[in-house]
Image (cartoon, grey):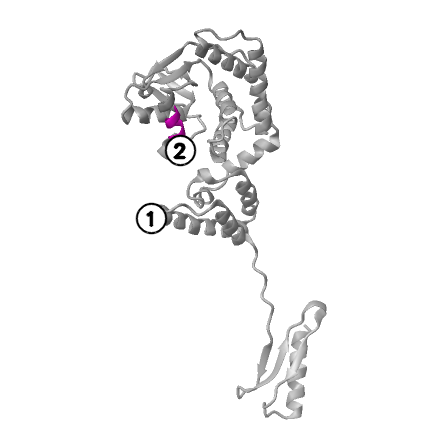
């Protein structure tokens, strides 16, 4: 389905670019206008583009509906982008922001471009104070902002399945009154595709913690684990195993070691829910009052068959042996 979403933007871009004259000296603005118009077509509305601006990233905040977990971004995750920004002397693709009114501390809210914002902020604090944050300002409501950043993110590989899932779950309640069908139609995706992400977003915190970094949880893992939580017995076993894994992951993190692989976590959670096989009943013994064993027997199995064996060295009379066999057989036949 991500391929389908990508084609929506690509087709709109191709159509726009086919009808757009060759760029002039103001090519960057023209390219932005083309892209925003294409996104507007994909959103089913005309998106008005304002002039690009170079601003201080400190005057921006990240929109709370943004899919990316901003405060967990790291230098390692942004290093490729930072290297490109240095090599190119700044951004080539602007972030999309909307104006913030009534807050003296910020001027804009970042709808698309949280990773670019983090990278520019990092560069300004590390020997590149002249770096500015390139933005395109656009007024839009929350639901439009959600759909815009969703289309942008579905073209990117550097955002996790969990972050997408978290964003969809929030949007479902915030903009679509919990109506999954309406949301899927609005996003132009199938309900089954959307359901897989919403299932992931509903995984218990204990299960997410078992992966160390919840951004490592993928759609496949979520699809395997979710059914194991449906019965009370299986759910209890999975949550207990998840707690053990979470403690192990915390220890690894404290020691500066990598988290357990996702495949390992999945396997251990799945094994925890597997019902243990009932142990095959072994033979039982009948003893005399003096403690000597006289009989060994097995309880009825499939078909009702059982076996009684007279043991040697018991010292009982023939009549006593027959009496014990009769008594034992009667108990087994009940």
Mark closer to the chain start, 2 or 1: 2
Q: Dot 2 lies on which element?
A: helix
Left or right for 97, reference 172: left
Q: Along the line of sight, which residue is nearer the eye, 285 or 129?
A: 129
Circle 1 residues within 10 Å: few <14, some 14–19, many ≥20: few
* Viewport quadrant of the N terminus: top right
* Viewport quadrant of the C terminus: bottom right
Q: Along the line of sight, which residue is nearer the eye, 80 or 332?
A: 80
Image coords of residue 103 (percent x, y): 32, 17
Residue at x 48% of width, y 40% of height: 217
Q: Which mark is residue 289?
A: none
Image coords of residue 159 (percent x, y): 47, 31
- Per the rendered image, the range of residues in magenta is 78-84
Q: Nearer the viewer, mark 2 or mark 1?
A: 2
Residue at x 66% of width, y 86% of height: 323
**Quadrant of residue 68 within the rendered picture:** top left
Q: Along the line of sight, which residue is nearer the eye, 278 or 254?
A: 254
What residue is disc 2 on?
Answer: 77
What residue is disc 1 on?
Answer: 255
Image coords of residue 242 (percent x, y): 46, 49
Image coords of residue 82 (percent x, y): 37, 27
Q: Is residue 15 magenta?
A: no
């Amino acid at each position: 389905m991500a391929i389908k979403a990508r084609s929506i933007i690509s087709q709109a871009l191709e159509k726009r670019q086919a009808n757009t004259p060759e760029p002039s000296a103001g090519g960057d603005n023209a390219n932005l206008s083309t892209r925003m118009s294409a996104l507007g077509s994909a959103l089913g509305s005309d998106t008005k583009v304002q002039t690009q601006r170079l601003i201080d990233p400190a005057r921006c905040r990240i929109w709370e509906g943004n899919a990316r977990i901003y405060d967990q971004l790291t230098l390692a995750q942004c290093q490729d982008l930072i290297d490109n920004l240095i090599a190119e002397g700044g951004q080539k693709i602007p972030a999309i922001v909307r104006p913030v009114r009534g807050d003296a501390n910020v001027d804009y809210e970042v709808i698309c471009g949280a990773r670019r914002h983090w990278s520019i902020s990092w560069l300004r604090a590390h020997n590149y104070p002249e770096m500015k944050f390139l933005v395109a300002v656009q007024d839009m409501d929350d639901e439009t902002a959600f759909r815009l950043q969703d289309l942008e993110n579905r073209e990117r590989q550097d955002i996790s399945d969990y972050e997408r899932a978290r964003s969809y779950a929030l949007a479902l309640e915030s903009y679509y009154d919990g109506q999954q069908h309406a949301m899927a139609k609005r996003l132009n995706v199938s309900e089954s595709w959307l359901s897989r992400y919403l299932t992931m977003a509903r995984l218990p915190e204990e299960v997410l913690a078992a992966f160390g970094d919840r951004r490592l949880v993928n759609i496949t893992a979520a699809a395997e684990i979710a059914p194991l939580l449906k019965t009370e017995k299986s759910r209890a076993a999975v949550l207990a195993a998840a707690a053990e894994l979470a403690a192990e992951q915390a220890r690894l993190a404290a020691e500066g070691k990598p988290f357990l692989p996702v495949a390992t976590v999945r396997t251990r959670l799945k094994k925890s829910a597997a019902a243990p096989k009932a142990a095959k009943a072994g033979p039982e013994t009948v003893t005399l009052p003096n403690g000597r064993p006289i009989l060994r027997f097995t309880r009825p199995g499939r078909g009702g068959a059982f076996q009684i064996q007279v043991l040697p060295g018991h010292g009982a009379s023939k009549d006593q042996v027959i009496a014990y066999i009769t008594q034992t057989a009667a108990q087994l036949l009940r």
